[in-house]
Amino acid sequence: MPQYQEQFPKGSKVRVRDFAVLESFKKEWRFHNPLRDDQLAFAGKEGRVSAVSFYHGGDVLYTLEEMPGMWHERCLESCK
């Protein structure tokens, strides 16, 4: 994706990636907005994007309705 271009606009329905993907991301990610332990419980759950923001440099961060924390784009997938 180009910088400052979200894959999932506000209002989009998304699915949190599976537990193995979240756990791997949590272990490997060393920068801003780390994935929190309480977010792992939402693996595989569907939700709706309530807000989109961008970290300096273009990383896309999402807030999901009724799910805690900020979500990196790599932790989400489209609901089809």
Image (cartoon, rainbow, N blue to C red):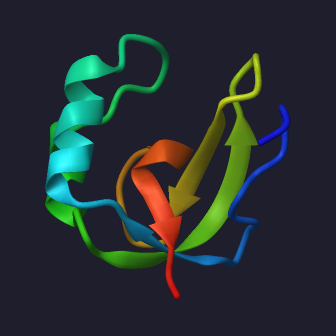
Residue 57 screen position, x and y as percent? 76, 17
User: Which image quarter is the N terminus in?
Assistant: top right
- From where the camera sits, is residue 27 visible? yes
Residue for point 76% across, 27% down: 58
Relative to 41, 8 lies left or right: right
Residue 19 screen position, x and y as percent? 16, 55
For residue 71, above or below residue 13: above
Quarter residue 63 falls in:
bottom right
* Name of the residue lying farthest toward the top: 30
Residue for point 25% across, 71% down: 44
Residue 7 screen position, x and y as percent? 71, 57
Relative to 13, 10 lies left or right: right
- From where the camera sits, is residue 72 visible? no
For residue 28, above or below residue 36: above
Residue 17 screen position, x and y as percent? 33, 60
Relative to 38, 71 lies left or right: right
Give the tally of numbered discs.
0
Residue for point 21% across, 34% down: 24
